Image (cartoon, grey):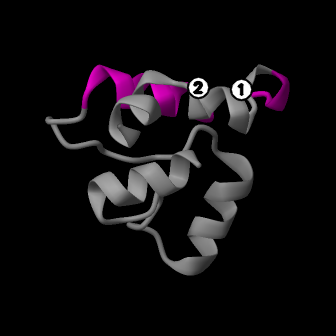
């Protein structure tokens, strides 16, 4: 989910600056992903991405939990 949000905000996927092979390496070995958010990105979206990109899967919220995060719930209403 986090990568999709990054792409929606930046119009580019994480690691878009790299060629295909380098991007595949980065995806498998570098966490969290590299991205630059626009200055207009809210604290809610930054927190959402921080949670989405937690280093260990056990630290990441389930999709149900992310759906009630302020970033999502404020934008659904």
Q: Is residue 59 above or below residue 74?
A: above
Q: Residue furthest left?
A: 40
Q: Residue furthest right?
A: 58
Residue underneath mark 2: 51
From the image, state whether disc 2 or disc 1 is nearer to you: 1
Magenta stretch: dominant secondary structure:
helix
Residue underneath mark 1: 61
Of 21 and 54, nearer the camera is 54
Q: Position of residue 23 (x, y in %)?
A: 57, 67
Which is nearer the N-term, disc 2 or disc 1?
A: 2
Provide the residue span drawn in magenta: 42-58
Residue 45 highlighted magenta (yes or no): yes
Regarding residue 64, the answer to whether it shows in the image is yes
Regarding residue 54, the answer to whether it shows in the image is no
Identified at 15% across, 36% down, the residue is: 40
Q: Position of residue 64 (x, y in %)?
A: 71, 33
Would residue 69 be found to the left or right of residue 43 on screen?
right
Would residue 77 be found to the left or right of residue 27 on screen?
left
Of 15 and 57, nearer the camera is 57
Of 16 and 49, nearer the camera is 49
Residue 54 highlighted magenta (yes or no): yes
Would residue 25 be found to the left or right of residue 58 on screen?
left
Find the distance from the CA under tag 2 to the CA under tag 1. Answer: 7 Å
Secondary structure state at the residue bearing disc 2? helix
Question: How many marks are shown on the rendered structure?
Answer: 2
Q: Residue furthest bottom?
A: 20
Q: Is residue 22 above or below residue 27?
A: below
Secondary structure state at the residue bearing disc 1? loop
Say if mark 2 contacts mark 1, CB within 8 Å.
Answer: yes
Q: Residues within 10 Å of mark 2 (few under 14, many from 20)?
A: some
């Amino acid at each position: 989910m986090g990568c999709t949000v990054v792409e929606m905000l930046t119009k580019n996927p994480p690691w878009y600056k790299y060629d295909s092979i380098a991007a595949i390496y980065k995806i498998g070995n570098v966490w969290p992903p590299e991205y630059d958010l626009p200055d207009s990105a809210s604290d809610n979206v930054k927190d959402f991405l921080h949670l989405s990109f937690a280093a260990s899967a056990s630290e990441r919220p389930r999709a149900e939990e992310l759906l009630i995060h302020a970033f999502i719930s404020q934008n659904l209403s």
